[in-house]
Amino acid sequence: MARSRAGKFWAEAEAHLKQIDERWKARVDRIGPCQLQPMDDHFGTLIRSIISQQISTQAAKTIESRLRLLTGGSYEPERILTIPVEEIRTAGLSRAKADYVQNLATAVASGRLSLEGVAKRSDTELIEQLTEVKGIGRWTAEMFLIFSLNRPDVLPVGDLGVRAGIQSHYELEKVPTPTECQRLAEPWRPYRSVASWYLWRDSEHRANVKNL
């Protein structure tokens, strides 16, 4: 099957990683092509990122499916604002996260946060604008950059999965600090988003093998 346009771009990233480190070659060959694809539903991507904060992937999927039932199947800021916080919580969200969801909806509906033309803004600019909304921290903004916009060189050092992946990759005795992660991942530029994606997928792969 022919690779998509995004897939052909990621092929350059895969080749770069495999060239700099034999461990990357083994990982990329085992997992296969990078599957990152741009997502046009920017608001929905941010909602899902808020849901995913500090919980497992499976728990996030369950909560997200329940929230979609409450919203009628799609995410629209105006629709979110018609749902009381306590009703949003019935999807499984904490009070804080339910508030964050409505904070985001308010910011977008009011125009305080524009999600139009985001492709033209730099990573730094977008992170600054997104984190002005209470409930969206740097991690959430970085997930948006990676999964919604497919920015190629984002390294989310606040993500424990990425840090644990770096620990495993370099066979370190303990989880590296964010600063250490930045240093260790320097050779991965300009494709640190792709490297992060592979670290996440590798962790999932090892967990699945362990549960067999």
Image: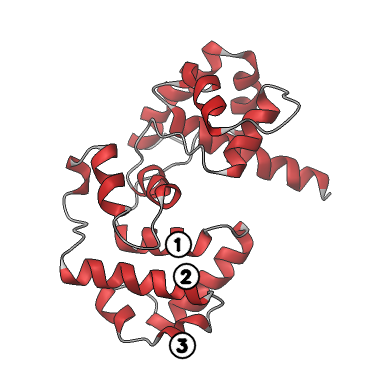
Q: Nearer the viewer, mark 3 or mark 2?
A: 2
Q: Are marks 3 and 2 in contact (CB under 8 Å)?
A: no
Q: Nearer the viewer, mark 2 or mark 1?
A: 2
Residue at (72, 24) in percent of width and height: 172
* Res. 18 in view: yes
Under circle 2, the secondary element is helix
Q: Position of residue 90 (x, y in %)?
A: 53, 84
- Depth check: give the residue in front, 77 or 53: 53
Q: Residues within 10 Å of mark 2 (few under 14, many from 20)?
A: many
Q: Are marks 2 and 1 in contact (CB under 8 Å)?
A: yes
Residue at (46, 34) in percent of width and height: 155
- The residue under label 2 is 97
Q: Is residue 143 left or right of residue 204?
A: left
Calculate the distance from the C-alpha at mark 1 to the C-alpha at mark 3. 17 Å
- Depth check: give the residue in front, 4 or 126: 126
Q: Residues within 10 Å of mark 1 (few under 14, many from 20)?
A: many
Disc 2 marks a residue whose amino acid type is Lys
Calculate the distance from the C-alpha at mark 2 to the C-alpha at mark 1. 7 Å
Disc 1 marks a residue whose amino acid type is Ile
Specify the quadrant of the image occupied by residue 173.
top right
Q: Position of residue 36 (x, y in %)?
A: 44, 42
Say which label, 1 or 3, has the lower sequence index.
1
Q: Is residue 121 left or right of residue 31?
A: left
Q: Residues within 10 Å of mark 3 (few under 14, many from 20)?
A: few
Calculate the distance from the C-alpha at mark 3 to the C-alpha at mark 2. 12 Å
Residue at (37, 49) in percent of width and height: 141
Residue at (48, 16) in percent of width and height: 187
Q: Are marks 1 and 3 in contact (CB under 8 Å)?
A: no
Q: Position of residue 143 (x, y in %)?
A: 43, 48
- The residue under label 3 is 87
Under circle 3, the secondary element is helix
- The residue under label 1 is 50
